[in-house]
């Protein structure tokens, strides 16, 4: 299950163009060069998404939609702001049991501002699944040092497929695939920085917000009922020694093994990429057959 912060369609309306007055919709109803504006009061709300054997559905834990309704990843749109910014957003469509549209959700990868007019400059259906998968891929930022079999710590960008890495529970494991992408470090999807010393790490560790870290706690401050637990990086943010890196662009790396692993990054135990129905879209088509679906034991 994953919870993503979205706007509902009614919060974004066309103020100039062919569809003037209409709310945000799916690709078939969009027209390029229409100009959108977000409502002055338009807080994002939580959409809880679960991957099932029948695809994506709305699950418990969110504020929106009907539990069990299907979700369709329609397209990725590109908006050009009157302030010169470019923002991409994923359009997600909720459908009822009859396959009819119930609601359209907008998941922007940067913050939309009420004082800015946004012109629709691109609609891409082909990249929706990949962009959604990128949100769920646990990623390390360029420069992160990974502990290899010799005990040395090597910058992630210097690792190669076939290199051997120390894992927490399964000894030494071989890297099977390395992913790399550059994304905007803005808003809810900006990476999280665990500053040196925060978790007994010698250097800063910067990871994607959904990345889970293996935490040891002397007292149950996190309320998990156990001393060792996996915690998403975004839930560790405290504004002091764990903060968001909300600026510019960031270069991400993903490490994939034969199985889901806990490895060591800057001395902190952190999960590797989980290869499943959702995240497999980021792996090149000609390499997918080399892997079987991971079942996380963590």
Image (tube, rainbow, N blue to C red):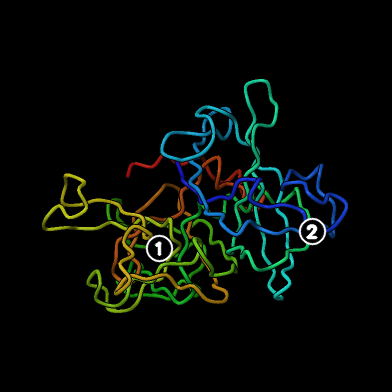
Q: Are marks 2 and 1 in contact (CB under 8 Å)?
A: no
Q: CA distance from mark 2 to mark 1?
A: 42 Å
Q: Is residue 83 above or below residue 15?
A: below
Neighbour tally class for label 1: few under 14, some 14-19, many 20 plus, Cα within 10 Å: some
Left or right: where does residue 126 sit relative to residue 139? right
Rendering coords of residue 88 (x, y %): 67, 60
**For the point 73% across and 62% down, which residue is it?**
79
Q: Is residue 273 left or right of residue 198?
A: right
Q: Quadrant of residue 214?
A: bottom left
Which numbered disc, 2 or 1, marks the residue that appears first in the sequence? Answer: 2
Label 1 residue SS: strand
Q: Which residue: 82% across, 58% down?
A: 16
x, y (%) of residue 178?
53, 62
Name the residue carrying label 2.
122
Identify the secondary structure beneath mark 2: strand
The answer to which of 236 and 81 lies nearer the viewer is 81
Going by the image, does 224 lie left or right of 48? left
Give percent across and percent down for residue 64.
51, 38
Which residue is labeled 1 in the image?
164
Q: Residue at x 36, y 55 (%)?
A: 232
- The label on residue 99 is none
Q: Nearer the viewer, residue 87 or 284?
A: 87
Left or right: residue 172 compared with residue 142: left
């Amino acid at each position: 299950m994953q919870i993503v912060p979205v706007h509902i369609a009614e919060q974004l309306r066309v103020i100039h163009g062919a569809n003037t007055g209409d709310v945000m919709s799916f690709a078939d109803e969009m027209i390029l060069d229409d100009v959108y504006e977000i409502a002055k009061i338009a807080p994002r709300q939580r959409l809880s998404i679960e991957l099932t054997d029948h695809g994506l559905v709305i699950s418990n834990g969110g504020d929106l939609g009907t539990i069990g309704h299907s979700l369709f990843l329609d397209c990725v749109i590109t908006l050009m702001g009157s302030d010169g910014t470019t923002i991409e957003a994923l359009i997600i469509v909720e459908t009822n049991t009859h396959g009819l549209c119930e609601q359209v959700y907008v998941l922007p990868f940067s913050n939309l501002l009420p004082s800015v007019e946004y012109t629709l400059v691109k609609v891409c259906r082909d990249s929706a699944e990949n962009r959604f998968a990128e949100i769920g891929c646990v990623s390390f930022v360029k420069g992160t040092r990974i502990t290899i079999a010799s005990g040395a710590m090597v910058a992630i960008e210097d690792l190669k497929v076939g290199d051997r890495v120390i894992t927490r529970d399964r000894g030494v494991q071989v890297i099977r695939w390395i992913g790399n992408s550059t994304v905007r470090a803005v808003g809810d999807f900006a990476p999280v920085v665990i500053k040196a010393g925060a978790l007994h790490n010698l250097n800063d560790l910067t990871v994607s917000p959904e990345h889970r870290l293996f935490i040891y706690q002397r007292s149950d401050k996190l309320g998990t009922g156990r001393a060792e637990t996996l915690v998403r990086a975004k839930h560790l943010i405290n504004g002091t020694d764990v903060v968001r890196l909300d600026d510019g662009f960031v270069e991400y790396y993903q490490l994939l093994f034969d199985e889901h692993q806990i490895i060591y990054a800057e001395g902190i135990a952190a999960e590797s990429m989980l290869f499943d129905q959702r995240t497999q879209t980021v792996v090149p088509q000609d390499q997918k057959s080399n892997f079987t679906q991971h079942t996380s034991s963590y």
